[in-house]
């Protein structure tokens, strides 16, 4: 077992990851470096990220992605099959795959150009067991290959919780879990989404605050367990979940 790598300008990512129980070896830290460089390079042509400062990316994108491990239901091994809905430049799916190489990952985004970047980065980092899918969640979630097939569904910065539940819970296998990464005060948003979550077969399990000194703002994980099947009519047509959230 290779030990944790030391230093190299990624101290915050490394020390933060350690607090999450993740020991990043030098190969993994290198992968994060390559990911950062490619992200910045492609960002000149594609709108991938508003954050470009080195340290900010390490913390606000990479470490933030890894905080999801605080709310996992099962040990993150081979049996963990996750889908990142609205992954954009691969957040949180790619950092998690780097940190937990055994997991299987589907990266879903509606934007074809972003998918080109994602394919490039998957190849560049030699990531195995990662599939890039282009399409709207509202459509892909009706395909049998993806519907209720995932033990873990993740999403960051895509929609309000009520709409988001409709875009994500249909992917989640019964017995699996959906974790939404959220910022700021979330209580009202969770309250509004309660009924939508129930209709879609979910049950609110926890709202977990992230208590890491690396973050200066308030971040949390909204943890929703999939306790029943999602009725076949959901998600509704593209755009409808956001326009008319279930309530
Ligand atoms: N999760 C990333 C990107 C957030 S931006 C991050 O946290 O940095 C939101 C992304 O969600 C965009 O890339 C957009 O294309 C995608 N998206 C929004 N609605 C979607 C939908 N209905 N289906 C699939 N992707 C969607």
Image (cartoon, rainbow, N blue to C red):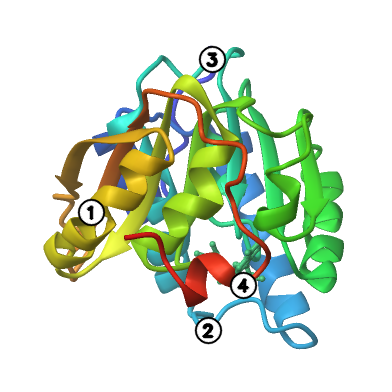
Report the Cα–Cα distance between label 2 and label 1: 21 Å
The image shows residue 137, relative to residue 28, as above or below, that is below
Name which residue lies at 38% across and 55% down.
64
Report the Cα–Cα distance between label 1 and label 3: 24 Å
What residue is shown with label 4?
Answer: 239
> Any mark on residue 77, and which?
3
What residue is shown with label 2?
Answer: 50
> What SS does tag 4 mark?
loop
The image shows residue 133, relative to residue 183, as above or below, that is above
Name which residue lies at 55% across and 57% down.
91
Name the residue nearer the viewer: 43 or 219.
219
Q: Position of residue 147 (x, y in %)?
A: 67, 33
State which tag comes first along the sequence, 4 or 3: 3
The image shows residue 156, relative to residue 75, as above or below, that is below
> What SS does tag 1 mark?
strand
Mark closer to the observer (4, 1): 4
State which tag comes first along the sequence, 4 or 1: 1
Name which residue lies at 67% across and 76% down.
40
Can residue 227 be seen at all in this image of the molecule?
yes
Whether tag 4 and tag 3 are in contact, CB under 8 A, the answer is no
Looking at mark 4, is its residue's CB closer than 8 Å to ligand 1? Answer: yes
What residue is shown with label 1?
Answer: 220
Q: Tell which quarter ligand 1 is in.
A: bottom right
């Amino acid at each position: 077992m290779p030990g944790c790598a030391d230093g190299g300008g990624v101290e915050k990512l490394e020390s933060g990851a350690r607090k999450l129980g993740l020991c990043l070896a030098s190969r993994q830290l290198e992968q994060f470096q390559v990911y950062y460089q490619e992200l910045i390079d492609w960002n000149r042509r594609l709108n991938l990220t508003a954050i470009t400062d080195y340290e900010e990316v390490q913390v606000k994108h990479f470490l933030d992605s890894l905080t999801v491990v605080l709310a996992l239901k099962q040990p993150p091994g081979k049996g963990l099959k996750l889908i990142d809905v609205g992954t954009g430049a691969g957040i949180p799916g790619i950092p998690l795959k780097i940190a937990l190489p055994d997991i299987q990952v589907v990266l879903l985004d509606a934007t074809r150009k972003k998918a080109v970047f994602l394919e490039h980065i998957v190849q560049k980092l030699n990531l195995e067991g990662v599939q890039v899918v282009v399409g709207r969640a509202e459509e892909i979630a009706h395909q049998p290959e993806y519907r209720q097939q995932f033990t873990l569904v993740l999403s960051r910065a895509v929609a309000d919780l009520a709409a988001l539940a409709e875009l994500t819970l249909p992917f989640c296998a019964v017995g699996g879990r959906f974790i939404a990464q959220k910022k700021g005060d979330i209580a009202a948003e969770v309250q509004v989404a309660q009924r939508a979550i129930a209709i879609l077969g979910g049950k609110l399990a926890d709202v977990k605050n992230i208590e890491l000194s690396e973050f200066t703002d308030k971040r949390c994980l909204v943890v929703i367990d999939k306790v029943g099947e999602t009725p076949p009519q959901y998600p509704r047509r593209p755009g409808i979940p956001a326009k008319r959230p279930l309530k």
